[in-house]
């Protein structure tokens, strides 16, 4: 199967995006690391924009904390799931769901008290200039001095997973290491179906430079899964699933201890930036 564009990919994903952050230890680490930064840096009250909010996992959490939320996502399928989940939790009056793209948000300047762009919407923007435009949009719609949270997918982790899984990507891993672009031309070289949708995988320095070029001030970079990123490898998933509660607590403590170490950030499956508009 050829590589799909992100909108089509997520339209076909059913509820897997809703489940992704709770179903595995790997996803739970991404969730807990993100929520810790939200709790530490969000204002006490206000209107929060959730860009690329998908199935609404963060939007529902924000509503539970008392925030008004606008969720924007280009995927019709994911928006439908978000609306279902929001209704199930009783937050229809608090959360609005709209179609939209991170590169052109369509809101007035300085509207939101905080803006989220989590999980990788910026990673699915393949053109470098368009990525800068996307960050400028996040900056534009957020009130001056208010927090902007953005996370992307890490390049080194993708390469490590290819090594651990003996993936066919290894034949052209040097190209992916150089460019970070998992796109149609890259997949066309392979003798197997695409493993994911079109994505740009980041290095930490590149991510920070992008955010600064887009006008936001980076305060903290966090490696969300950190040293446990490798647990996403198919050969290690069973091992991760079989960890006892005590062992899982140890993994969590290790990841928490090293989340902001720059080397760990760079090798993490997802890296999160806490910024100010």
Image (tube, rainbow, N blue to C red):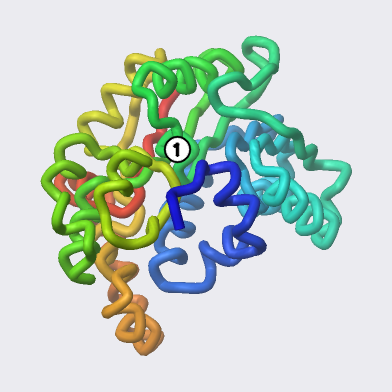
Instruction: Describe residue 83's horizontal placement relative to residue 204 as left or right.
Output: right
* Residue plotted at (28% across, 79% down): 236
Residue 209, horizontal then vertical, whole percent: 27, 22
Q: Is residue 55 above or below residue 178?
A: below
Closer-to-camera residue (221/210): 210
Total marks placed: 1
The quarter of the picture where residue 170 lies is bottom left
* Residue plotted at (60% across, 17% down): 141
Residue underneath mark 1:
124
Residue 176, horizontal then vertical, whole percent: 20, 44
Q: Is residue 234 above or below residue 77?
A: below
Residue 104, horizontal then vertical, whole percent: 60, 19
Instruction: Describe residue 16's horizontal placement relative to residue 133 as left or right.
Output: right
The quarter of the picture where residue 186 lies is top left
Closer-to-camera residue (14/157): 14
Badge 1 element: helix
User: What is the crowding at mark 1: few (fewer than 14 residues within 10 Å), some, or many (at least 20)?
Assistant: many
The quarter of the picture where residue 240 lies is bottom left
Residue 226, horizontal then vertical, whole percent: 27, 57
Instruction: Describe residue 202's horizontal placement relative to residue 272 as left or right.
Output: left
* Residue plotted at (16% across, 50% down): 172
Q: Quadrant of the N terminus?
A: bottom left
* Residue plotted at (50% across, 28% down): 147
- What is the residue that sits farthest to the top in this orientation? 109
């Amino acid at each position: 199967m050829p590589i799909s564009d992100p909108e089509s990919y997520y339209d076909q994903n059913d509820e897997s995006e809703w489940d992704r952050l709770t179903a595995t230890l790997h996803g739970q680490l991404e969730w807990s690391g993100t929520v810790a930064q939200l709790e530490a840096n969000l204002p006490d009250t206000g209107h929060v924009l959730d860009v690329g909010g998908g199935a609404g996992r963060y939007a529902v959490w924000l509503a539970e904390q008392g925030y008004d939320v606008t969720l924007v996502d280009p995927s019709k399928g994911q928006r439908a799931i978000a609306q279902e989940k929001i209704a199930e939790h009783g937050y229809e009056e608090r959360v609005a769901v709209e179609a939209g793209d991170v590169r052109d948000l369509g809101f007035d300047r300085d509207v939101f008290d905080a803006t989220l762009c989590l999980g990788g919407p910026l990673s699915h923007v393949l053109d470098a200039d368009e990525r800068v435009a996307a960050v400028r949009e996040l900056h534009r719609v957020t009130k001056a001095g208010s927090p902007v949270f953005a996370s992307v997918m890490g390049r080194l982790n993708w390469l490590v997973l290819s090594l651990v899984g003996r993936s066919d990507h290894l034949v052209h891993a040097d190209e992916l290491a150089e460019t970070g672009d998992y796109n149609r031309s890259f997949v066309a070289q392979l003798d197997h179906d695409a493993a994911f949708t079109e994505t740009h995988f980041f290095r930490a320095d590149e991510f920070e430079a992008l955010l600064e070029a887009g006008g936001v001030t980076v305060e903290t970079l966090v490696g969300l899964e950190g040293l446990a990123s490798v647990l996403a490898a198919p050969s290690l998933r069973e091992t991760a699933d079989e960890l006892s509660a005590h062992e899982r607590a140890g993994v969590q403590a290790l990841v928490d201890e090293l989340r902001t170490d720059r080397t760990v950030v760079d090798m993490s499956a997802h890296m999160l930036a806490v910024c100010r508009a």
